[in-house]
């Protein structure tokens, strides 16, 4: 890095503790900024100097991927085997094993690097935005926008000196010194561990204060729990407090169920390999065979019983699935989350944007007294917004959908912001469910205006008349969203407190409409075919939710309101939540409680939300789903981000997750059964015969050829019936499958042994060639029977890629013992009658496997466990990993160096 850039970075560095003790004006001066922010030109220059506001990048690194290939225990075994061959003077066998090693590394590298590139492309599409002020004063006026203009930028483009506006639910994008606050409370538990929110104020703090006492600053990664603020960026990326912690922790991510299943499967293979290898080694020593030859053969068996390319197959499956999902506008934060998406069988979602269009429009104002006009109610509604009156019609940045709809309505054009002065504001929060302002019109007395949920606003007014209640019920029954507006005189007041919200007079109602989606019913039907039950959790009135559900054809199993939920114990709510379809007027804590109890009752629960009030439930769900337009805190809490908030898109994601898992299991079942059978046959033959049934290099060549053909499995078709319900890792099922179909494979291996010894009187080279061809043919072609549960397997159509790869591997396996390199590989030519016998054995083998498959799956269906279902528990620090993902950069930028967690190899 040039020395000049280092000095530039240092000159504008201001430790957050030092900034906390300075006045706002002093901090702005030291950062070379001002109240109007930076010019575009200066911001671009600082971005080039400081780099992006990112903790880490998601750039695929070829050398790192290549290094992980050699970290595989399987490849280490191959290296040891090749080294022993060379040490023993067997250069030919050593070269063969070396070539096999290079092919294995090449295949693994190619597929895993493609998966990394897919993840890289995926990450670049998940964006987070911040509202900044870009002016024209600091650093020169060139390239600046009009002074004080607000605009949205990607959080990675923030630089020291940027002035940023933040509101309820925002995740602080950088370490910032506060310039102004409005009832600001921040959740800083991710940094300080304190469960209670911290009150913030722009006044300087005394020197020497601890991190938790820096009330004049907010920190990257913390969340605004109430209120809002304006602040100047002091530190970005790895120089922020959160950035330093995240870089110190590296990239450790909590493991998903899919990864844990792979780990359990690897342990099963390790047990089998250790037992079998040890027995073979001891048996060969008892037979007084050379020590090193016995050791090499045993190592080859250990390698042969393990599916070397399982990591590549898994990576290819996930990368293929990622590309398919990205085309369907579904983005996952980590590739392995795709399988967890397919595991879902209960979906809890808000109705806005899923069952409805998500485009809220203002339809009219309903005054409740003759003294108030429609325009008067609308004006009060516009006053009770958090946006700056003079800018609200120009930009909707930072506004909630209801306020944005108000300002975009035709009636708002007659609103004159110069007539009103806002004295104070209490922002909306999800406990009060209302916004309150203190305003003064043209020098007149102050007036308090409150706007919010009808039930909460009416509770602050006098008794509700039957006529008003009937008016409200009529709108709810029509499916409209209703906001109540109330007011009272507040002469002499200049500040507001929540205690001032009393003795209000209802002015009227603001009516909004969000129409049901045309494709909502079809999407719900599609989810039902996938075995997913959909439940609605909304902050809306119960009647509105029931009306929308009825219009899209949802058959309701009952409605629970927030008050009903509070009255139920956990056991009672767990039972009611399973049957209920609609949860109305629920708080964030109630949503999270519902999710936890649904999981406890045995479901794999997905939660779909995009608001501040959804973050807690997103964290509690097995799979959190949000949308690209969601609030920062919701998008941060989610595992999956949809570019289009549509249940049909989500159904595609579920189907893809299940397809990936089904294809991974195909490879696992294929590899364990055929590899186990072949290695068991080799072990037995090595004890009975006077020579090794296959040389170590031949075993490894056989295994790599077979595995190469199976790389087409990730693109294979999956039967529709396998997508109708989620599947799970079941090691007992895999073990039973291995111990049934492995011995069947061995029976035909023994038949080949007998054929070669007693019919063709084969010498060792012929014997090895015959078994090599039979082994490749049977274990490769059996994929067509094992890939489906249908009997006969011809009723299920494999992909063209799988057909071509399998037949190509069989052809190559037959060609090698007949080719010019046969002698180098240790093979002798075979008589023509052998191939006729081989054809007959393959047909009998496939027929026998079909009978065994029908019996196995029928018996397995009757032995499903009937015990309690275990709830998956997330690691305590899963939210830190998710938050760290947010502060990561696209692929085109550079971030501080960091430690990378090596990928576990199986």
Image (cartoon, rainbow, N blue to C red):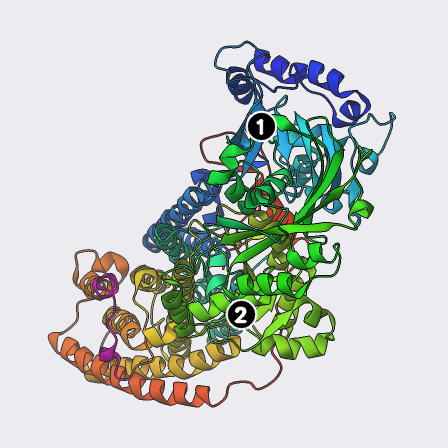
Q: What label does residue 274 carry, if any?
A: 2
Residue at the image position 62 percent from the left and 59 percent from the top: 617
Q: Residue furthest front?
A: 370
**Element under label 1?**
loop
Q: Residue 282: x and y, percent?
A: 52, 73
Q: Is residue 429 visible?
A: no
Rendered-image quadrant of the N terminus: top right
| Residue 439 sits above or below residue 29 on the image | below
- Compared across the picture, whether 103 is left or right of 425 comes to left
In the rendered structure, does residue 801 fall within the stretch colored magenta?
Answer: yes
Vertical placement of residue 135 versus 443, above or below: above
- Closer-to-camera residue (878/588): 588
Q: Using a 10 Å C-alpha cutoff, classify the residue at mark 1 as few (fewer than 14 neighbours), some (14 to 19) or many (20 or more).
A: few
Q: Quadrant of residue 603?
A: bottom right
Q: Which residue is mark 1?
A: 390
* Residue 206 in the image, given as x and y percentages of width and height: 88, 26
420 and 65: which one is in front? 420
Give the farthest residue toward the left: 832
Q: What residue do we see at 51% from left, 52% from top?
A: 512
How far across and how far down the image is residue 192, in percent? 78, 43
Helix, strand or loop status at disc 2: helix
Main SS of residues in magenta: helix
Q: Position of residue 199 (x, y in %)?
A: 80, 40
Residue 615 colored magenta?
no
Among the two numbered marks 1 and 2 on one chain, the one whose residue lies closer to the N terminus:
2
Label 1, label 2: how far apart the Cα atoms are: 75 Å
Write the start and end of the magenta stretch as one range.
791-806
- Rendering quarter of residue 683: bottom left
Nearest the viewer among 173 and 496 is 496
Residue 546 visible somewhere in the drawing: yes
> On the rendered structure, is 555 left or right of 427?
left
């Amino acid at each position: 890095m040039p020395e000049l850039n280092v000095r530039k970075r240092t000159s504008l560095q201001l430790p957050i503790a030092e900034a906390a003790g300075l006045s706002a004006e002093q901090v702005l001066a030291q950062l070379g900024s001002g109240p109007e922010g930076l010019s575009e030109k200066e911001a671009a220059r600082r971005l080039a100097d400081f780099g992006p506001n990112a903790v880490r990048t998601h750039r695929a690194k070829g050398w790192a991927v290549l290094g992980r290939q050699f970290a595989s225990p399987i490849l280490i075994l191959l290296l040891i085997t090749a080294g022993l061959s060379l040490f023993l003077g067997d250069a030919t066998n050593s070269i063969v094993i070396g070539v096999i090693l290079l092919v294995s590394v090449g295949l693994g590298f190619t597929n895993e690097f493609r998966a990394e590139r897919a993840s890289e492309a995926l990450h670049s599409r998940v964006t987070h935005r911040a509202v900044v002020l870009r002016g024209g004063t600091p650093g020169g006026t060139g390239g600046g926008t009009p002074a004080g203009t607000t605009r949205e930028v990607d959080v990675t483009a923030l630089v020291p000196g940027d002035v940023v506006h933040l509101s309820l639910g925002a995740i602080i994008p950088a370490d910032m010194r506060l310039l102004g606050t409005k009832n600001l409370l921040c959740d800083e538990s991710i940094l300080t561990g304190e469960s209670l929110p911290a009150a913030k104020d722009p006044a300087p703090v005394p020197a020497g204060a601890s991190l938790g006492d820096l009330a004049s600053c907010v920190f990257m990664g913390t969340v605004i729990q109430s209120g809002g603020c304006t602040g100047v960026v002091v530190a970005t990326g790895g120089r922020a407090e959160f950035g330093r912690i995240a870089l110190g922790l590296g990239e450790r991510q909590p493991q998903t169920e899919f990864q844990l299943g792979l780990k359990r499967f690897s342990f099963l293979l390790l047990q089998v390999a250790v037992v079998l290898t040890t027995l073979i080694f001891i048996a060969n020593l008892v037979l007084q065979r050379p020590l090193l030859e016995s050791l090499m053969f045993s190592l080859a068996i250990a390698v042969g019983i393990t599916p070397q390319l399982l990591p590549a197959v898994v990576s290819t499956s996930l990368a293929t699935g990622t590309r398919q999902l990205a085309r369907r506008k579904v983005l996952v934060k980590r590739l392995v989350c795709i399988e967890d998406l397919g595991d879902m069988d209960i979906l809890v979602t808000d109705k806005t944007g899923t069952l409805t269009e998500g485009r809220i429009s203002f339809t009219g104002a309903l005054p409740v007294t003759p003294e108030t006009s429609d325009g008067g109610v609308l004006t009060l509604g516009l006053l009770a917004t958090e946006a700056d009156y003079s800018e609200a019609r120009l930009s909707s940045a930072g506004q909630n959908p209801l306020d944005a709809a108000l300002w975009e309505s035709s009636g708002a054009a007659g609103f004159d912001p110069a007539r009103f002065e806002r004295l104070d504001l209490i922002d909306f929060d999800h406990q009060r469910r209302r916004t309150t302002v203190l305003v003064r019109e043209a020098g007149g007395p102050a007036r308090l205006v409150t706007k919010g949920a009808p039930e909460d606003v009416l509770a602050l007014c006098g008794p509700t008349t039957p006529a008003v209640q009937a008016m409200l019920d009529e709108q709810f029954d029509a499916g409209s969203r209703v906001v109540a507006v109330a007011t009272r005189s507040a002469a002499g007041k200049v500040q507001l407190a929540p205690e001032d919200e009393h003795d209000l007079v209802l002015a009227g109602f603001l009516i909004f409409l969000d129409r049901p989606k045309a494709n909502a019913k079809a999407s719900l039907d599609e989810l039902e075919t996938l075995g997913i039950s959909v439940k609605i959790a909304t902050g809306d009135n119960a009647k509105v939710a029931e009306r929308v559900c009825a219009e899209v054809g949802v058959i309701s199993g009952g409605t629970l309101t927030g008050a009903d939920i509070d009255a139920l114990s956990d056991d009672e709510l767990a039972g009611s939540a399973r049957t209920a379809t609609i949860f109305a007027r629920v708080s964030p804590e109630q949503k999270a409680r519902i999710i936890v109890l649904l999981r406890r009752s045995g479901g794999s629960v997905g939660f779909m939300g995009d608001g501040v009030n959804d973050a807690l439930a997103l964290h509690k769900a097995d799979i959190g789903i949000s949308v690209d337009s969601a609030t920062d805190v919701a998008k941060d809490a989610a595992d999956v981000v949809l570019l289009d908030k549509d249940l049909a898109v989500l159904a595609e994601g579920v189907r893809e997750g299940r397809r990936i898992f089904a294809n991974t299991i195909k490879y696992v079942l294929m590899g364990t059964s055929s590899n186990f059978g072949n290695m068991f046959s080799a072990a037995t033959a090595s004890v009975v015969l006077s020579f090794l049934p296959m040389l170590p290099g031949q075993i490894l060549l056989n295994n790599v050829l077979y595995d190469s053909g199976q790389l087409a499995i990730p693109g294979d078709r999956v039967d529709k019936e396998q997508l109708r319900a989620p599947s799970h890792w079941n090691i007992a099922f895999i073990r039973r499958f291995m111990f049934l179909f492995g011995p069947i494979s061995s029976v035909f291996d023994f038949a080949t042994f007998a054929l070669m010894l007693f019919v063709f009187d084969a010498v060792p080279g012929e014997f090895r060639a015959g078994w090599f061809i039979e082994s490749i043919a049977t274990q490769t072609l059996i994929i067509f029977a094992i890939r489906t549960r249908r009997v006969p397997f011809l009723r299920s159509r494999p992909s063209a890629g799988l057909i071509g790869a399998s037949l190509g591997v069989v052809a190559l396996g037959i060609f090698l013992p007949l080719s010019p390199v046969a002698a180098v590989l240790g093979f002798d030519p075979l008589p023509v009658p052998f191939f006729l016998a081989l054809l007959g054995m393959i047909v009998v083998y496939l027929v026998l496997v079909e009978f065994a498959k029908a019996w196995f799956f029928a018996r397995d269906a009757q032995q499903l466990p009937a015990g309690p279902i275990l709830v998956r528990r997330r690691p305590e620090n899963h939210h830190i990993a998710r938050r760290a993902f947010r502060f990561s950069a696209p692929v085109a930028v550079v971030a501080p160096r960091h430690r990378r967690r090596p990928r576990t190899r199986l």
